[in-house]
Amino acid sequence: MLRESGIYEVEIIDLTEKGEGIGKIDGLTIFIDGGLVGDKVKAKLSKLKKNYATGELLEIITPSEGRVEALCQYRECGGCQIMSLSYEKQLELKRNSVVQTLRRIGGLEEIVHVHAVIGMEYPYEYRNKAQFPVGERGGEIVVGFYKKGTHDIVDAKSCCIHRKVNEQIIEIVKYYMKENNISAYDEKSHKGTIRHIVTKIGFTTGDIMVVIVTNSKKLKNANLLAHALNANIPGFKTLVQNVNMDKTNVILGKQNNIVYGEGKITDYIGSLSFEISPLSFFQVNPVQTRVLYEKALEYAALSGDETVFDIYCGTGTISLFLAQKAKHVYGIEVIQEAIDAARENSVRNGIQNAEFFTGKAEDVVPRLYEQGYTADVVVVDPPRKGCDEKVLGTIVEMQPKRVVYVSCNPSTLARDLKYLGENGFKVKEVQPVDMFPHTMHVETVVLMSRKDK
Ligand SMILES: C[S@@+](CC[C@H](N)C(=O)[O-])C[C@H]1O[C@@H](n2cnc3c(N)ncnc32)[C@H](O)[C@@H]1O
């Protein structure tokens, strides 16, 4: 008979989507945070329910074959769930998860081959954007990350998936706060000034933007901070104060005051340039974004004569990539600000054959088709919930030669591939790409073509 607080030996046989280890004791499923497939562990039952239990990892009795010493010393942040697995094993795990999901949900037994995941040569320091909460403990300023599932700040000196320069930026901001007697924000009392330090870095250009999020309209002696950043941080281009006086978990407010520089930086994906501002969206791993988009472009196999639909186009990055090789690209996206950015990005890059429509894809795509628009190639890059069935139905009616599906969620990808598979398309290629090393996240690009071609 199992009991809460009891200590048990468990073999980890699988991982959840969040990266928790899954084991069985007497047939009951137990979730153990920190366990890796192949580990034999000692765990204390922390919660016992009818259908499952959770356990606290006490000791690794026999480590999994792929277990390594994680580079990070702040594991309580919970951000990199599988960092204790060697990178090679992480990539294998991600490929297996795509294969299993396509089989289980998509019924895609006939998939002969899911390519090996394209990983990073150096799977660290890959994020171009960082958001550090600022607080106070025992009279000292603390800056770092929230402890998993809480708003307690872990005072972290470094983070190996962020750029090293962030450490210096944090030190400079801390020093500026002390020297100028500027307080850190306290969530509970909604008092204090500095809430977050946000940094954005152009990997190609080396440009750096620092954003100080404040619970006040003014930021005392902000020019002194700009001066210190300028003197010590190579590549520093702009300092922005972002005002956020709301009681909210949303990090950035709407108002930006430029303290120094232009309030924006530039970066490139391939030969295309993009403007990055405090509030704009830009893919956080630009190195792998390029790999992903090049794969999508390769699968689209454009000769210059094709009309392409890029559905769920965001700020138009894929659309502009495709437009360089297509006759015409139509991008469809629900967020107006993203469409505005897509149009600005086209002008900025001298692209004249991309056109953008705002609205829900499930409304816009059928309407465009009714009006006579059609596509030779369709690219979709939907949110986690996948494509709306009306969108898939219209793609089927359009009969494009190829569909390129870019997915951040293997489960909804599998469901949508099943639908397209039952309606005249077949899967030709499946290529997972690792956009977020050390997390469970996997991005997948799939090429489908018409069965009758
Ligand atoms: C995975 S992102 C695509 C990002 C884009 N390819 C890029 O590179 O910027 C999914 C996009 O779908 C948009 N979206 C979500 N629901 C939508 C809907 N019903 N119709 C159109 N776009 C939608 C989101 O706003 C988001 O920009």
Image: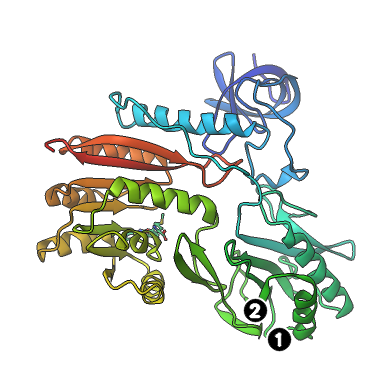
Q: In this view, does 68 lie above or below 142?
A: above
Which residue lies under the disc numbered 2? 240
Q: In which quarter of the image is the C terminus?
A: top left
Residue 349 left/right relative to 61: left
Percent x, y for residue 211? 66, 73
Residue 192 appears anywhere in the view: no
Q: Which residue is drawn at 36% across and 52% down?
A: 382
Q: Residue at x 43, y 49 (%)?
A: 292
- Quarter assignment of residue 53: top right
| Mark 1 / mark 2, whichever is N-terminal | 1
Percent x, y for residue 276? 53, 71
SS at circle 1: loop
Residue 22 left/right relative to 449: right
Judge the density around disc 1: few (<14), some (14-19), many (≥20) Cα neighbours within 10 Å: few
Of the numbered discs in the image, which one, if any, rests on residue 18? none
Q: In this view, does 56 lie above or below 393?
A: above
Task: Choose between 352 and 199: the one closer to the eye.
Answer: 352
Percent x, y for residue 267? 53, 67
Residue 401 left/right relative to 5: left
Q: Mark 2 belongs to which amino acid?
A: Val
Task: Choose between 21 and 69: the one closer to the eye.
Answer: 69
Residue 221 appears anywhere in the view: yes
Percent x, y for residue 396? 16, 47
The number of numbered badges drawn on the structure is: 2
- Quarter assignment of residue 444: top left
Judge the density around disc 2: few (<14), some (14-19), many (≥20) Cα neighbours within 10 Å: many
Q: Residue at x 61, y 55 (%)?
A: 127
Q: In this view, does 439 lie above or below 136?
A: above
Which residue lies under the disc numbered 1? 218
- Tell me how far mark 1 sits from mark 2, CA to CA: 12 Å
Q: Mark 1 belongs to which amino acid?
A: Lys
Ligand 1 lies in quarter: bottom left
